[in-house]
């Protein structure tokens, strides 16, 4: 029989794991970004998008098991990391380069490379300068999409949970994720490639194709994760000893005010 302190430690460890997976997947999106596109059947998606659906699975699990405030807290920490990544890149760009730089820090481009701001770079250029120019816009776009989509996911999830009185787990999981990922796809593509579109270097049809491919991939993964979401929710509810009465209420579990399996109501 576990004591209340044992259960609290167990619940905090699970939250730490879910938050860790969430933040890792989000950071990978910013690091890999649009540096590489891959083909998945008829879809062409940025490689950075591949781990991103895990963020919505983690958000929904935290929303279901720990409540709205914990989910919003995790999303806010992720937003802070986005700012940190952008700040580090800006700081490095502002610092003077070393005098005896290794030769691989400079590359010769075989052809001009289009940048997110609509301009292009060609000839000999610094490796970091190229990375900075191609990723900072994408990081900023992902920050805007991240704020819109992740908070949308939490809000829609809990709205549907209240509307259905805690029933129909599959409905709030799928509708919240599908809605938020549509927001994410439209915002991230519009901000990342908007300058190119306005300057005429990217056709509207190409932008819509990127949006559709991006969303279709996320939509399919959202439908696929319904099974894992059900399994993990049921298993973790038992593992964390969250009874059915508590699991049907929306609320929050906090370190300052530890929850119990029978008494504490989550907001």
Image: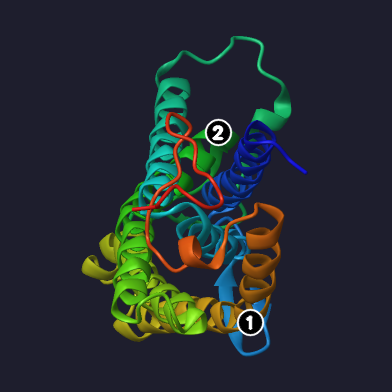
Numbered label attached to residue 168: none
Question: What colour scheme has been applied to the protein in the rendered image?
Answer: rainbow
Q: Look at mark 1 in the image and give the residue it sits on.
A: 224
Q: Quadrant of residue 232?
A: bottom right
Residue lying at 40% horizontally and 81% vertically, measured from the top left: 175
Marks 2/1: CA distance? 38 Å
- As helix, strand or loop, the secondary structure at mark 1 comes to helix
Q: Quadrant of residue 154?
A: bottom left
Q: Look at mark 2 in the image and give the residue it sits on.
A: 128
> From this viewpoint, which residue is outermost toward the bottom?
42
> From this viewpoint, which residue is outermost toward the top?
99
Residue 44 relative to residue 239: left or right: left
Residue lying at 34% horizontally and 67% vertically, measured from the top left: 158
Local crowd size for mark 1, using a 10 Å CA cut-off: few (<14), some (14–19), many (≥20) = few
Local crowd size for mark 2, using a 10 Å CA cut-off: few (<14), some (14–19), many (≥20) = some
Q: Nearer the viewer, residue 168 or 146?
A: 168
Q: How many marks?
A: 2
Residue 238 relative to residue 258: left or right: right
**x and y, in percent, of residue 120 in the image:** 40, 53
């Amino acid at each position: 029989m576990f004591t209340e302190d044992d259960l609290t430690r167990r619940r905090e460890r699970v939250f730490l794991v879910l938050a860790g997976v969430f933040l890792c997947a989000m950071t990978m999106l910013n690091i890999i970004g649009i540096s590489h596109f891959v083909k998945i059947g008829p879809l062409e998606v940025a490689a950075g998008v591949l781990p991103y659906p895990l963020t919505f699975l983690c958000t929904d699990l935290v929303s279901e098991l720990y409540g709205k405030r914990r989910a919003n807290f995790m999303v806010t920490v992720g937003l802070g990391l986005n700012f940190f990544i952008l700040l580090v890149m800006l700081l490095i760009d502002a610092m003077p380069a070393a005098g005896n730089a290794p030769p691989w820090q400079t590359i010769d481009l075989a052809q001009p490379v289009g940048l997110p701001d609509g301009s292009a770079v060609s000839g000999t250029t610094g490796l970091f300068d190229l990375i900075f120019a191609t990723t900072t816009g994408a990081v900023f776009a992902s920050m805007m999409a991240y704020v819109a989509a992740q908070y949308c996911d939490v809000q829609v999830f809990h709205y549907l949970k209240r509307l259905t009185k805690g029933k129909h787990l599959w409905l709030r999981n799928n509708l919240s994720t599908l809605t938020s990922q549509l927001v994410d796809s439209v915002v991230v593509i519009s901000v990342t490639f908007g300058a190119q579109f306005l300057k005429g270097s990217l056709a509207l049809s190409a932008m819509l194709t990127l949006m559709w491919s991006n969303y279709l991939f996320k939509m399919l993964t959202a439908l696929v994760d319904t099974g894992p979401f059900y399994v993990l929710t049921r298993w973790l509810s038992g593992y964390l000893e969250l009874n059915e009465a508590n699991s049907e209420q929306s609320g929050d579990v906090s370190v300052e005010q530890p929850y119990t399996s029978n008494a504490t109501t989550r907001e």
